[in-house]
Image (cartoon, rainbow, N blue to C red):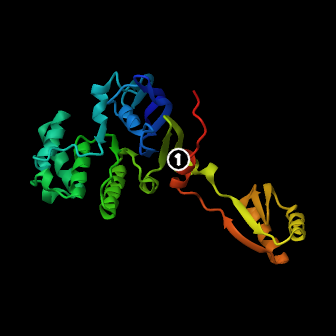
Amino acid sequence: MELIRLKGVSKNYKKNKILRDVNLMVEAGDVLGVIGQSGSGKTTLLNLLVGFIEPTDGEVVYYSKVEGKEKDLNDNLHKIKRHFGFTPQHNSFYPKLTVKENLIHFGKLYKIDKKTLENNITSLLEFTKLSQHHNKLAEHLSGGMQKRLDISCSLVHKPKILVLDEPTADLDPILQKEILHLLEEVNKQGISIIIASHQLEHIEKICNKVAIVHKGRVQSHGLIEDIKKPFLKDHFTINVHSGKEKAHILEKLKGLHFKKIIDKNHKLIIYPEHIKDTMEGLLNIIKDEGLNFYDMDVRKPTLNEVFEKIALDDQPEEE
């Protein structure tokens, strides 16, 4: 079920175009990763999603399951904001309050009745493993515990969507792993998650979808596996020692189906139409002819590799 959608959204600050014509959808159960270089517009995108700022053009709509219709996020922010939890990169809790006092404070901001709030806090402390620390001042918690408290403050009103900006920044690898596991458990509770992060290996680990923000636009958006497809490395390379051998191999390859063959010095680079069939035929040729075959690469690229290919594209922006 669709929860929130950006329709042709642009955001300008004075004459600076931060985001342009963004179309993006978040569905129930999604864990959406928002990635981009510093200054690409991803933090602005998060702020638009939670209603902290309004778009210059376009609209942000939220789908109401109860009413069965779309609502403009900014026009109905006072009603819709209770469905969002937001965890910024830097701590948002009050260091001089205890863990429980922080949760009570943030719960009251959403006007939760006392009994419901107490129940929410009890279950949340147990869920985030903060029960034994509920009377500690927030400033005395470890870095990992402080991040757990930040996330807890964002969940105290039981939102439908949790938005996080760099949730594992400045944490050591062990604490990063713990926070990622916590977020996976949050998602299992039926809460959709939107994460902005520079740590792409974390995005790839826990997200099912990704939005790649580059030069103020969402260049790619969708399931991670679908985003990777155009970047698959699906070629074979055959080493040849002479022109005569090359001609012999090319003659043998005529029976296989391929998109193209690139003749590059002492290499033949083959791009097949059907990897499995072409690979089987190619292996038979190698066996029969005793060819020197190497450098077969049919693996899926990492999200980091895909992002680098997009981010390092130096083509000029469209005006």
The N terminus, quarter of image: top left
The residue positioned 23% from the left and 40% from the top of the image is 157
Q: How many other residues sit within 10 Å of disc 1, few (<14), some (14-19) or many (≥20)? A: some
Q: Is residue 50 left or right of residue 270?
A: left
User: In the rendered structure, which amino acid carries the disc numbered 1?
Assistant: Leu
Residue 283: image location, x then y, percent: 77, 71
Whole-percent x and y of residue 279? 74, 66
Q: Position of residue 80 (x, y in %)?
A: 31, 30
Residue at image point 30% right, 55% down: 170
Q: Position of residue 275 (x, y in %)?
A: 72, 60
Q: Quadrant of residue 107?
A: top left
From what the image shows, is residue 3 above or below residue 273? above
Question: In this rendering, is residue 296 above or below 99?
Answer: below
- The number of discs equals 1
Tell me the quadrant of the picture where the C terminus can be found: top right
Residue 118 sits in which quadrant? top left
- Is the residue 137 above or below the residue 177 in the image? above
List the residue tagged with mark 1.
223
Is 143 on the left or on the right of 247, as rendered? left
Observer able to see residue 1:
no
Q: Is residue 299 visible?
A: yes
Please, what secondary structure does the residue beneath circle 1 have? strand
Q: In the rendered view, does 253 fall on the left or right side of 202?
A: right
Residue at figure coordinates x 88%, y 61% from the top left = 254
Q: Is residue 62 above or below residue 160?
A: above
